[in-house]
Image: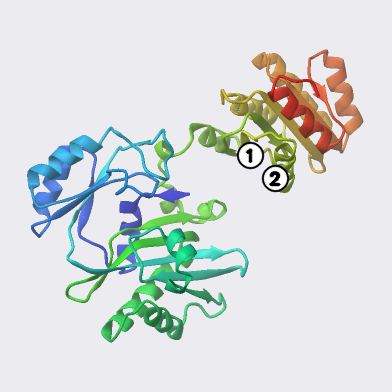
Amino acid sequence: MNIHEYQAKELFRKYRVPVPEGHVAHTAGQALSIAEQIDGERWVVKAQIHAGGRGKGGGMKVTNQLAEVETFADRLIGSHLVTPQTGPAGRIVHRVLVEQAQDIAHEYYLSLLIDRGSQRVSVIASDAGGMDIEEVAAKTPGKIVREAVDPAIGLQDFQCRKIAHGIGLRGKQIHALTGLLKRLYRCFRDNDAQLIEINPLARLDDGRLIALDAKMSFDDNALFRHPDITDLRDFDEEDPKEVDASGHDLSYIALDGNVGCIVNGAGLAMATMDAISYYGGLPANFLDVGGGASPEKIANAFRIVLDDPNVHSVLLNIFAGINRCDWIAEGIVQAIRDQQIGTPVIVRLAGTNVERGKAILAASGLDFIEADKLDDAARKAVAAANGETA
């Protein structure tokens, strides 16, 4: 789960991580009022969406004119902001963050994230902040500093000092970064975060370090421990189909292809998408119905997948263990009848009660394409999506 920059900065404040003075505004009038109350002579207005590259997309402005704060906020709120990370459709801006502008001497990059390879939290830093960190890593990897944190002892002072030296900090700034990093690590650990990213972390003209930006994401599986974090979820920033799926205990991620996928188990779902790609197709989604897929869940899975107009065939691939193939078959029959599905449906069943499941499908008299193996099912699904016969 992702949260907005202003929400991440509120969380930073609880851990005494320095951030600029500022507040969120939902109207241009609120933006002007906030700017009037903030000390200083310059202000920053930032669009609040779950995507990076807002500055490149025209979603950020620095001004020393109060009237421009109101005018720019009015222009942003309600607009579609297109950035390198939103795709051509962009995102609707519902709110802006108004902050005190800072006198910046240098910009750094800083993040904490889960390194799947080492299975540890890793700290990544660079003195090339404010830029695309991927480009920096590719062209000048020597500018990237990495430190893995031993979960048994946590982030250590010597690691913080090593990071500080690696990005060119000296003197009191080393001590300042050490304290900031340790507070960020506690914030990460306490809240079951998956990512904290600050780009840029700024060194001001007076030597202070301050987080000018803040991005945070959290482990969905741990949200039951953090109702306060769960309350920060912004459904407007999520795919409606993904929100709908989560309400039915389905794991769904929209993709760009034309072959819909309904599978039980994340590993099998990935293998299914690989098989579709192998035969020249493109999966339209990832959808895992889980281990206890009732007929109702299967029916909802069909409805959500077919809500995508790009889906030209649906591949249902079930290897039943905890699941039962007869349950799955009942769900397929219910979905095709109730939803009057005309899109080609390819069904591959294996495992518990498979013969009973196949019998239910055969007795239904409904039009579907049967497959016994994954590669056969994927080949038929790709052919059907292209209007061909496998």
Q: Is residue 378 visible?
A: yes
Q: Position of residue 291 (x, y in %)?
A: 73, 42
- Vertical order, 331 against 213 (above or below): above
- Above/below status of 313 relative to 242: above
Q: Quadrant of the C terminus?
A: top right
Residue 332, picture quadrant: top right
Label 2 neighbourhood size at 10 Å, few (<14), some (14-19), many (20+)?
some
What x and y, as percent, mark residue 238? Answer: 46, 39
| Residue labelled with disc 2 | 270
- Whether residue 108 sits left or right of residue 364 in the image: it is left
Instruction: Inspect the image, locate mark 2, and give the three-letter code of the amino acid beneath it.
Output: Met
Foreground of the two, 266 or 153: 266
Identify the image quadrant of residue 351: top right
Badge 2 element:
helix
Residue for badge 1: 286
Labels 2 & 1 near each other (Cβ < 8 A): yes
Please tell me which residue is depicted at 74% across the width and 26% down the height of the picture: 383
Circle 1 SS class: strand
The correct choice, above or below, for 139 with respect to 162 in the image is above
In the image, taking residue 390 as reference, residue 101 lies left or right, namely left
Residue 81 location (% of width, % of height): 33, 38
Tell which of 301 and 314 is nearer to you. 314
First reached walking from the N terminus: tag 2 or tag 1: 2
Q: Is residue 312 left or right of residue 187?
A: right
Pinpoint residue 109: horizontal percent, then vertical percent: 37, 66
Residue located 40% across and 79% down the image: 166
Q: Is 341 situated left or right of 33 in this image?
A: right
Front one among 17 and 93 = 93
